[in-house]
Amino acid sequence: MICPRCGKEIPEGETLCPFCMQEIDKNMEFNDFREDGFVQIQSKNELNPDEPASYKPKYFDISEYNIFVIAVVFVLTVSVFTVFSLRFVQKRASIYVPEYISTEPATVVETEPPTIKNTVEKYGIKDLKGSWKIAGDEETDATAIPYLTFGDKGYLQQNYGTVIVKGTYSDISDKNDHGVYLSIDTNFRGAYDFEVKGNKNDGYTLTLTNRTSGGIIDLKKAQANMKKLGRIKNYKVDKRLLGVWLTKDKQKGYKFVDNGRVKRTSNNTITYGVYTTDKKKNLHINYMKEEIMGVDLTYELNKKNNKLIINDTLYIKQK
């Protein structure tokens, strides 16, 4: 009998190989010892004498199997490690890319403001009617902007907070140009070329070009807003002041109301405000233009002859 481990001849009757101490299974028959050191092993109970001669027993190489498994595991490990390494590098790169500062000058893409479709084919002095504000001006509860209003029969008015300035306008257009002359005690006074553009949906614009200085004023059609001030906290009213007071030429005057409100006229300007008085005959009036403003005045009242002096100006009470 041949030992399956060392391949040496085992004496009959032995249960252990005297050379390598391999235990011998009596049910196993070892034969066909090959030159490569492998032994064909078959159980005696499984031997079939009728088995075809073409049958060839399978040989199983433990060493080659282990090498194959190790190779597969190695390839998978390397692949997984490579994938995670690339993902880590990619993540780190995405973190540091924003910190890169280019030395190349930035390219500035200039965008033109949206244009308003113009449907005004022909225009004239009648197209100025309505209220206009300076393009881009916006007001808040605490601030005001001027509005220019063109009315009928050449009437012109500027609203600015609680101040109204009255004036006139006239058509000075000729065959080649559109012109208007503004007669008003504001920054709008003078002769202008004008141009009206826009449409009903987007609104209309008015461009005034001063014929003397060349200065351009861009206006946008808007609803004129007239501010109204809240009354002064804890206001005091000298009841002797109540009523309308005018100068002799009736170009200037005051109208005092018992609710703490006052209306002041001066030539073509009307100022609405709120007031309070004290025992020392001081008169304080608040009004608004760009923002709320205040003025302090003194007054003397002669009730017998219905005369009022405010800062050296004489006013006579009106019946």
Image (spheres, rainbow, N blue to C red):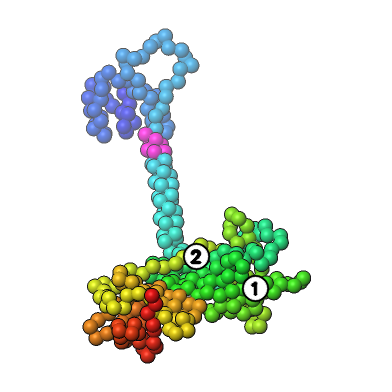
Image-quadrant location for residue 184: bottom right
Magenta stretch contains residue 167? no
Identify residue type, mark 2: Ala
Left or right of 314 in this view: 126: right
Nearest to the observer: residue 109 or residue 6: 109
For the C terminus, the image quarter is bottom left
- Coordinates of residue 222 in the picture (x, y in percent): 53, 63
Q: Is residue 251 visible?
A: yes
Q: Which residues are magenta?
A: 62-69
Q: Secondary structure at mark 1?
A: strand
**Total numbered labels:** 2
Residue shown at 37% from the left, 27% from the top = 39
* Main SS class of the magenta portion in the image: helix
Q: Is residue 230 above or below residue 88?
A: below
| Residue 224: assigned label | 2
Nearer to me, 278 or 203: 278
Looking at the image, which residue is at 24% across and 28% down?
Answer: 23
User: x%, y% of residue 244?
Assistant: 38, 76
The label number, if any, that marks residue 170 in the structure image: 1
Mark 2 crowdedness (10 Å alpha carbons): few <14, some 14-19, many ≥20: some
Q: CA distance from mark 2 to mark 1?
A: 21 Å
Query: At 47% across and 67% down in the image, what residue appears?
Result: 138
Q: Position of residue 79 (x, y in %)?
A: 43, 47
Residue 111 in view: no
Circle 1 packing at 10 Å, graded few (<14), some (14-19), many (20+), is some
Please, which residue is most extreme toward the bottom here?
A: 312
